[in-house]
Amino acid sequence: MQTENRFIDDIVKMMNGAAGTLAGVGREAESSARSRAREWIGGLDFVSRDEFEAVKAMAAAARDEADVLRARLDALEAKSAASAPVTPAAPTTDTVAPHGTVQGQSQTQSFGGTDGGPVAQS
């Protein structure tokens, strides 16, 4: 049903125009809000998804490499332990001198190094 009244047609056209304008303003406000949020988040030193995934892949590769190296080390230690017979250490007759040195049968060891570690003396 179409009306013959120009006044109502003009009001409908004006309402359609206002609705289109409001929709455009809404889109512009959303775009502006997104832009400001990106700026604000960018200032907080967040990382992007791509950067996160790249570092995650690097960490997984490093973990895998560490596992491989650990397995190699275990194999070398097992091989070394199998080839070298283990002999129990004989008890020593070390004595401690009053000035902080340990005197044994073969050498004297001082515990007064510059870095706090032992200093071997012959």
Image: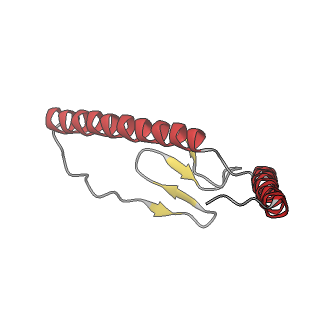
Which corner quadrant of the image does residue 11 belong to? Answer: bottom right
Residue at figure coordinates x 33%, y 57% from the top left? 92
Q: Nearer the viewer, residue 57 or 9?
A: 9
Q: Residue furthest front?
A: 4
Instruction: Quadrant for residue 97, please give it.
Output: bottom right
Residue 63: tell me if it is visible: yes
Q: Quadrant of the N terminus?
A: bottom right
Q: Please state the total of marks drawn on the protein image.
A: 0
**75 in relation to 17, above or below:** above
Point out the residue furthest to the bottom here: 98
Drawn side of residue 41 relative to residue 55, left or right: right
Note whether residue 43 is visible: no
User: Residue at horizontal 71%, vertical 61%?
Assistant: 3
The structure's colour scheme is: secondary structure
Q: Position of residue 72 (x, y in %)?
A: 28, 33
Q: Is residue 40 left or right of residue 104?
A: right
Who's the residue at 57% across and 44% down the image?
A: 49
Image-quadrant location for residue 75 = top left
State the image coordinates of residue 27 (x, y, percent, origin top left): 75, 52
Front-most of 41 and 51? 41
Q: Is residue 74 left or right of residue 98?
A: left
The one nearer the camera, 77 or 110, is 77
**Residue 92 to residue 56: above or below:** below
Residue 61 percent location from the top left of the image: 41, 35
Q: Position of residue 14 (x, y in %)?
A: 83, 58
Quarter of the image where the C terminus is located: top right
Question: At 18% across and 33% down in the image, what residue appears?
Answer: 79
Image position of 22 with respect to 107: above or below: below
Viewed as shown, does residue 96 lie left or right of 61?
A: right
